[in-house]
């Protein structure tokens, strides 16, 4: 009421902002009806003749037909990559290699709107995120590794770093262009050539990236893109002329890949699942912490391997944090990924939606209490509302398994020891968050949490200079930073 009284015209003050729709135009994206495989700098028909549409999660609209690569196609792509490696790329002056990477980075910046719209169309993530996170970070990765290309001897002094050869790279559907950049930029900077396999549900930005490579005049065969399903990935993994496999995806497939590569002497890095603990101490700035919780789990619909999907709140502030969290959840706008006001977009595929629904049902059956703010979901497409579970026991599936959706499980603790014990009680070890005003507590928690990345008083922040990767079933090897070059190099040991 105090606010109403302050207004001179005495009109009522709205209790919440109403937002008109603000759709981003999709005209900037020009899609072909059908895409082949990008091999040796040319578009090629798949030997199988097999194509399937890539579909927009927001309304199930088929966007373009995409080729499905088989063993023969993967073999051609690996040959093209080997040829490019031996006949020029690996002998190119490192400063020349750097020029190509700088060019790619600049072109990504110039065409960022086009890529952002396509990423949101094909994957379902809000345009605000693809525009402000995925695209700037993708360009930043190319800029960053361009800088290292001619300084490898300084990055690894007295070790004579040399490229390994052909890298086979398999990426998931949650950050299609960003994962492409995380993989391709360090591989090229180190002097390798690449065969990349994008995820079946999100191949379109990788195919548009092939156009960037042509624009940058990257020599033919240095990067080859083979689309398709898991079969193409499996063919790439078992190909004998691939020197290194880099995989990001599920722990299950990661284990299969590890079995296939075992004993071959080929290099392997795995970036797999997570079930991160986001830990709120009672001395934390609670309003900021609530923003961190929201960003931790509802960013990219929770399709994030490092999502803060297990929230640990100190008992003394539990009620207060829950109340603030539920209030904030009520302001999240779920809907069209191309609307600039959207906070939570569409679920990437019907298969992923089913998986989320199944795990959420298990949470209710096991006895957890569910809360979802009132929100109207679009009729077409795949959607799931922001969800929080309380009364969660550590043994419940929703506290153990990666849901990979907008679903948060809340648990409590009393002492730092208990928080560490519970946070580490998971087969995963990718990331964690700690919220407290005490620097000493941040440091002691960071030392005791078994996670590759630990955020302090923030969450889901990424930077190309900072290594990212996990422990335990979250995989091994690091991407980003100087560490991210190492798996793409061989050394005098
Ligand atoms: P996958 O691990 O199956 O997919 C990741 C990539 O691997 C895709 O390009 C996929 O191709 C490819 N692939 C699939 N099978 C094989 C194989 N046998 N050999 C080589 N490559 C293969 O993840 P899903 O898409 O099936 O998602 C399932 C669950 O995995 C999710 O619910 C989520 O929990 C988790 N996940 C975790 C991710 C992370 O970053 N931690 C990322 C993605 C998923 P294609 O997509 O064409 O089948």
Image: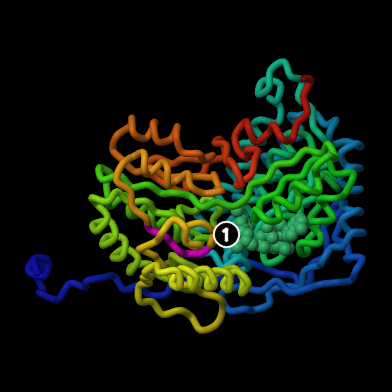
Question: At 77% across and 73% down in the image, what residue appears?
Answer: 52
Question: At 70% across and 25% down in the image, what residue appears?
Answer: 152
Q: Quadrant of the C terminus?
A: top right
Q: In this view, does 404 lie to the left or right of 186?
A: left
Out of 462 and 366, give the one closest to the viewer.
366
Residue 479 within the magenta-colored segment of the rendering: no
Residue 406 within the magenta-colored segment of the rendering: yes
Residue extending furthest toward the bottom = 379
State the residue position of label 1: 113
Question: At 50% across and 60% down in the image, what residue appears?
Answer: 302
Out of 485 and 232, give the one closest to the viewer.
232
Residue 7: image x %, image y %? 11, 68
Q: Quadrant of the N terminus?
A: bottom left
**Secondary structure category for the residue under label 1:** helix
Quarter of the rendered structure image containing ligand 1:
bottom right
For label 1, being within 8 Å of ligand 1 is answered no
Residue 190: tell me if it is visible: yes
Residue 410: image x %, image y %? 38, 58
Q: Give the range drawn in magenta.
A: 404-410
Residue 208: tell me if it is visible: no
Out of 55 and 18, give the one closest to the viewer.
55
Residue 435: image x %, image y %? 34, 43
Quarter of the image for residue 36 reads: bottom right
Q: Does residue 181 sit above or below 49 in this rendering?
A: above
The color scheme shown is: rainbow
Residue 94: image x %, image y %? 76, 29
Report the number of numbered marks: 1
């Amino acid at each position: 009421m105090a606010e109403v009284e302050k207004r001179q015209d005495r009109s009522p003050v709205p209790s919440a902002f109403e937002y008109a729709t603000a759709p981003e135009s999709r005209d900037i994206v020009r899609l072909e009806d059908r895409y082949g495989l990008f091999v040796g700098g040319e578009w090629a028909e798949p030997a199988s003749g097999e194509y399937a549409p890539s579909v927009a999660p927001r309304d199930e609209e088929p966007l373009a037909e995409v080729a499905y690569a088989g063993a023969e196609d993967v073999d051609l792509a690996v040959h093209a990559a080997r040829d490019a490696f031996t006949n020029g790329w690996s002998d190119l002056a490192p400063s020349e290699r750097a020029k190509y990477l700088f060019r790619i980075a600049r072109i990504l910046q110039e065409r960022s709107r086009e890529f952002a719209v396509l990423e949101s169309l094909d994957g379902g993530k809000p345009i605000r995120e693809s525009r402000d996170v995925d695209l700037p970070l993708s360009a930043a990765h190319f800029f960053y590794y361009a800088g290292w290309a001619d300084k490898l001897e300084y990055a690894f002094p007295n070790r004579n770093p040399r490229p390994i050869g052909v890298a086979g790279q398999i990426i998931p559907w949650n950050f299609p262009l960003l994962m492409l950049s995380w993989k391709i930029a360090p591989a090229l900077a180190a002097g390798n050539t690449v065969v990349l396999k994008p995820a079946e549900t999100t191949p379109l930005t990788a195919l548009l990236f092939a156009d960037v490579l042509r624009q940058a005049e990257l020599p033919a065969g240095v990067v080859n893109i083979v689309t398709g399903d898991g079969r193409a990935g499996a063919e790439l993994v078992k190909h004998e002329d691939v020197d290194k496999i880099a995989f990001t995806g599920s722990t299950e497939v990661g284990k299969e890949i590890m079995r296939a590569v075992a004993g071959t002497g080929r290099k392997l890095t795995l970036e797999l699942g997570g079930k991160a603990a986001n830990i709120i101490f009672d001395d934390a700035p609670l309003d900021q912490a609530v923003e961190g919780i929201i960003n931790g789990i509802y960013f990219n619909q929770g399709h994030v391997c490092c999502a803060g999907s297990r929230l640990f709140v100190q008992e003394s502030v539990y009620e207060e944090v829950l109340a603030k969290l539920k209030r904030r959840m009520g302001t999240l706008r779920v809907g069209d990924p191309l609307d600039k006001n959207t906070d939570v977009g569409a679920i990437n595929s019907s298969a992923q939606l089913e998986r989320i629904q199944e795990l959420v049902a298990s949470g209710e059956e096991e006895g957890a209490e569910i809360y979802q703010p009132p929100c109207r979901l679009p009729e077409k497409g795949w959607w799931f509302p922001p969800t929080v579970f309380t009364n969660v026991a550590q043994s419940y599936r929703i506290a153990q398994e990666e849901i990979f959706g907008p679903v948060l499980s809340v648990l409590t603790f009393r002492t730092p020891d208990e928080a560490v014990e519970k946070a580490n009680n998971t087969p995963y070890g990718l990331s964690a968050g700690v919220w407290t005003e005490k620097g000493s507590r941040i440091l002691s928690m960071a030392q005791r949490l078994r996670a590759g990345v630990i955020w302090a008083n923030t969450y889901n922040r990424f930077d190309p200079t900072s290594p990212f990767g996990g422990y335990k079933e979250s995989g091994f090897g690091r991407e980003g930073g100087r560490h991210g070059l190492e798996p793409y190099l061989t050394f005098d040991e």
